[in-house]
Image (spheres, rainbow, N blue to C red):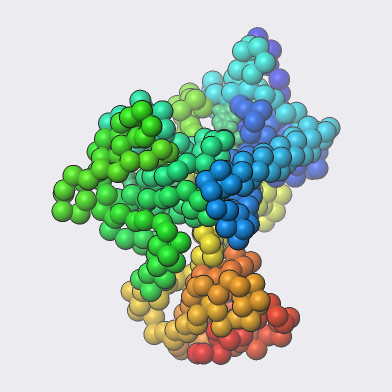
Amino acid sequence: MTTENFDTLIIGFGKGGKTLAGFLAKKGHKVAMVERSQEMYGGTCINIACIPTKSLVLSAEHAATHQPGTFEEKQMYYSNAINEKTRLVTALRKKNYDTLNTNPNVTVIDGLASFVSPSEVEVTLSKNQKSLHIQAGNIIIDTGTEPYMPQIQGLEQSQRIYTSTTLMEKQRLPHHMIVIGGGYVGLEFASIYRAFGSEITILEQRDTLLPAQDRDVAEAVMQTMQGQGIQFHFHANVQRIHDEAEQTIVEYTNESGQKQEIKGDAILVAVGRAAVTTELKLAEAGIATNERGFVKVDEHLRTNVPHIWALGDVNSGPQFTYISLDDFRIVRDQLYGDGKRSTLTRHHVPYSVFITPPLSHVGLSEEEAKRQNYEIKVAKLPAGANTRAQIMRETTGLLKAIVDAHTNKILGCTLYSAESNEVINTVAMAMHADMDYQILRDTIFTHPSVSEVLNDLFSLL
Ligand SMILES: Cc1cc2nc3c(=O)[nH]c(=O)nc-3n(C[C@H](O)[C@H](O)[C@H](O)COP(=O)(O)OP(=O)(O)OC[C@H]3O[C@@H](n4cnc5c(N)ncnc54)[C@H](O)[C@@H]3O)c2cc1C
Ligand SMILES: NC(=O)c1ccc[n+]([C@@H]2O[C@H](COP(=O)([O-])OP(=O)(O)OC[C@H]3O[C@@H](n4cnc5c(N)ncnc54)[C@H](O)[C@@H]3O)[C@@H](O)[C@H]2O)c1
């Protein structure tokens, strides 16, 4: 059995891990990066999540603009989009691999890692299934999450079940896709596939859409998506799934417990994601996990074993690529900084749901601010008030800002509009800098731009 020694071992090619690998290599560390799949160099985001989905969002919006008439024409746009997505992802994957693999201080190892002890990890090599043992002073777990599959009768047997990963490999556009789960993944894929021309029905077990948002925002999103032709069923409790020759039947109960059924030719399961920790054999190293299998960490992302950290989705923090990147910064500052950065100092994290138009948010909602007993001022503006939106012919949406009436500090902002995924970062930055809202009201922005709508929105206060 070969044993190799490294200063740092990183398990999983995720955002935080790969960034840390490059950083530590620059500092002279000998780094091993172990990745179980050659299809995953660069991690989930670039291969099967953020990047391919956003490529499809753009292609789907183009397809919708051209209004293809027949299903075969829609299919053609879809096939081209899948090909373009594959081209992009393949190029990014290669770039990610080459960046680390050509670094003289980094060794990329294709294999599945599992702990043997707190300081030793066994890697089953992909090419020949032989084992390599690695010992390292520091070990970083960045193994991410994967789609959670609920216990539903018939789900495993059905040939028409897809996850976010497998759906993007599907060459034929579904005629009618049933989406189980109306969260981030469910909404984004519903929006994408509807724009390509599929019929879409969302089955959501909660009683409402976007529970963290104010009701006026959630209502605006729902009305827009319904206007695009997407059907919603809330309180839907899926009981059974079974295939027929051409279609699959999904049986569920509604709010009053009545049995309903619906037929589709593709079922997307989008009910959250599970930690990828089983094969790591964490117990061999005594690493503690929570009841859902996510690695427990402190505010500096250290596990209960001091030289082992966990970054990204697997540590049960918010599941975003930019959080995995920020996790890197926390560990970087532990190893080479003042060590003050932590999850406790992480505030005003923005997010975007990439429906059309995108929904972006930072800070508190109006309802949450009231619950926290703030005295607030609220500004609301239709997205179409912005001239840039009019030029882009994307006037749908709603903008909302919540400000502390006593201090004039921005408590929260929701932008449901074209380009909101860009503009929300300006608001988040203002909040980080603890600016009064008047700065956004009076800053000189270029014209015509979507950003300048912040002048108008904050002028309403
Ligand atoms: C459909 C979808 C769309 C998304 N869109 C966005 C978005 O627009 N913006 C955003 O910020 N976030 C988005 N996310 C979330 C984002 O993709 C994740 O938060 C992020 O990729 C997590 O990165 P990570 O660092 O945790 O690890 P990952 O990138 O998940 O990497 C983990 C790696 O570890 C490897 N691995 C696992 N176990 C082992 C083992 N035992 N040995 C060796 N290797 C192993 C895996 O193969 C994988 O490559 C999206 C997620 C999904 C599902
Ligand atoms: N734009 C982005 O940044 C982006 C995009 C996609 C995913 N993500 C990340 O990925 C994570 C996972 O996304 P997701 O959509 O899978 O999870 P999610 O937690 O966002 O949503 C899951 C939804 O499924 C519902 N649900 C659960 N079980 C159900 C059942 N049996 N039947 C019907 N509905 C059910 C839940 O009530 C919830 O609304 C997100 O939390 C997010 O952090 C981010």
The residue under the point 37% across, 69% down is 219
In this orientation, does residue 221 appear?
no
The residue under the point 70% across, 53% down is 337
Residue 58 vertical position relative to residue 316 in the rendered view, above or below: below
Residue 179 is situated, as x and y percent measured from the top left of the image, at 40, 46
Residue 450 is situated, as x and y percent measured from the top left of the image, at 64, 75
The residue under the point 38% across, 74% down is 216
> Which of 110/67 is in front?
67
- Residue 260 horizontal side relative to residue 193, left or right: left
In this orientation, does residue 254 appear?
yes
Residue 317 is situated, as x and y percent measured from the top left of the image, at 49, 50
**Which residue appears farthest toward the front when viewing the image?**
70
> Which of 89/225 is in front?
225
- Residue 436, picture quadrant: bottom right
Residue 250 vertical position relative to residue 367 in the rendered view, above or below: above
- Residue 70 horizontal side relative to residue 154, left or right: right
- Residue 273, picture quadrant: top left
Location of the N terminus by quadrant is top right
The residue under the point 45% across, 43% down is 175
Residue 133 vertical position relative to residue 162 in the rendered view, above or below: above
- Residue 104, picture quadrant: top right
> Which of 112/83 is in front?
83
Q: How many marks?
A: 0
Which quarter is ligand 1 in?
top right
Residue 96 is situated, as x and y percent measured from the top left of the image, at 74, 39
- Residue 101 horizontal side relative to residue 114, left or right: right
> Which of 92/300 is in front?
92
Residue 361 vertical position relative to residue 39 in the rendered view, above or below: below
